[in-house]
Image: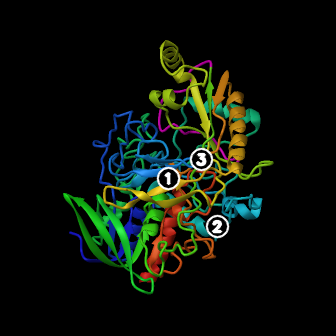
Amino acid sequence: MTKAEYDVVVVGAGAAGAIAACVLAEAGQTVLLVERGRVRTYGDSGHRDHLRNHRLQAYGFNTGPDIEGNPRVFVDQAGERHVVRPHEPGYHVNAAGVGGGTFVYGGLAWRFHPDDFRMASLYGRPAASSLTDWPFGYDELEPWYERAEQEIGVSGDGSGDRNGGPRRRDYPMPPVAANRTTARLAAGADALGLSTFAPPLLVNTVPRDGRDACIRCGSCVGFPCPSGAKNGTQNTALPRALATGRCTLLVETVVEGIATDGRGTVVGVDILTADGEFARRRVSTRAVVLSAGAIESARLLLMTRTRREPNGLGNNADQVGRNLQGHYYPTVFGLFDEDVQDSRGPGVTIATTDFNHGNDGVVGGAMLADDFVMLPIILWKSGLPDDLPRYGLVAKRFMRDNFRRIAQIKGPVHEIPDPECRVALDGEVRDRYGRPVARLSGTTHPETVRTAEYIRRRADEWMRAAGAVRTWSKPPHLALSAGQHQAGTCRMGDDPAVSVTDRFGKVWGHENLYVCDASLHPTNGGYNPVLTVMALAFRNASSLAQALN
């Protein structure tokens, strides 16, 4: 039963929100955790549907949002507006449901490199960019990385990464075992003098917390886990929060606005519940934490307009929604003269961080690794050579003869943030609740494309050194980047003129309004960002709990 008042309202039950709710509830606060999606299980999430997942989205998603009633507006490079639905290009979807993307992610659990926190100091600021340093360094976040690894559950080899930052403890579980691809790529890396190791994963390699170890199935990224071995917040932090008796989970509900008094103090939230007729109500609170993702957290701030802040909460400096970024993924496919793919999951078994920094002539770099097991239909959709027809006997024969002979190497390139890549409110299109939808515009900074091309060449060299008889890839190009690694729209900093929050996620001008998701990231690293999202959630929620107590 939802009460009329809570100590804290947390908006979004994903990677950050569920952890924030857990920390606050275990610290003695009453918490209302509001989630627009629903509770999903393995059985009701299309676990056998290879046409609807987060790597093949032509027909919708297995984790929401619903196709109807949740449009966005995407503005292309020519300035043309396109109304797009969740399964269409330009939407930049993330999951909508309890656990958020952690319910179906691959679970790569990287710490950011120490240099990722000081990109502007290291490289300067490219023209027309908003590249900046984080307001703190790796050392401040290291204990919180450790807490996320130990409490959510990461498998890996803490001594394997010779380029990473210092750590005090190893991972709580050993790494995932090698598969058929590993040996070929390891031999190629050795020939090039690259250091490699098993990448960290939020996956149980041994039974843990009452859940099984990974069974090595081939449907990992984009799908729920059949054995429960994948560690998302829905099966780690959230059960702990609910077990306190102080956390209430409210699903299929959205926050329509944030109520403040004349001084900017948050006093409540207005919620809409999709229960037959839409039911509106006000919930009073001592603090609000936004953890809805970089697009939706920014959208909610922009939707809440007051006389004191007519352009949206925290937006008097016109910073909310700017610097939208994600990750550009240069990918190289290699065809071998023998089978290199055994479809044993999760699939990512070998990585190098030798190219994350220190690359001549480019800003930043990327971690490179093999990929999760690729379903045949996804290889057909996005991985066939450009000179091969997509239909007919030739394509079918290529797939039949070569699917198990193909490997891939890819990595998330450092994005150079651009203030013109942004989330704004559209003046015409509304969602099913009557709220203005997010309008996304802008394009990748040219320096990001240059770095992506550098990384693509390094991946190709590695693939050829591993013995590929043919390689192919798509050249990088200018495009808006957000999607599953969306970040940056409510960046934290020390100067209210160029940031939205302070270093603990507290929105400037508001003593009890916080952002707690990847929106905070001034830059998004050259790695998958989810462990950083989790570490920040532990850190910032602990700070808020201390303030409330």
Instruction: Please report contact status of discs 2 and 3: CB closer than 8 Å, yes or no.
Output: no
Magenta highlight on residue 8: no
Q: Is residue 548 visible?
A: yes
Pointer 2 residue: 134
Picture quadrant of residue 251: bottom left
Q: Nearer the viewer, residue 12 or 443?
A: 443
Pointer 1 residue: 154
| Percent x, y of residue 443 | 61, 50
Q: Secondary structure at mark 1?
A: loop
Q: Is residue 293 visible?
A: no
Pointer 3 residue: 77
Question: What is the spatial separation of the Cα atoms under label 3 and label 1, in whole angstroms?
Answer: 40 Å
| Crowd tier of the residue under label 2, counting other residues whose Cα lies within 10 Å: few below 14, some 14–19, many 20 or above | many
Q: Secondary structure at mark 3?
A: loop
| Percent x, y of residue 477 | 65, 41
Give the mark, 2 or 3, whose residue is nearer the N terminus.
3
Per the rendered image, the range of residues in magenta is 337-356
Assign the magenta stretch its main secondary structure.
Answer: loop
Q: Measured along the vertical axis of the image, is residue 35 above or below residue 265?
A: above
Q: Nearer the viewer, mark 2 or mark 1?
A: 2
Q: Amino acid at mark 3?
A: Gln
Residue at 45%, 63% in the rendered image: 299
Q: Measured along the vertical axis of the image, is residue 546 above or below residue 337?
A: below
Q: Amino acid at mark 1?
A: Val
Q: Nearer the viewer, residue 408 or 443?
A: 443
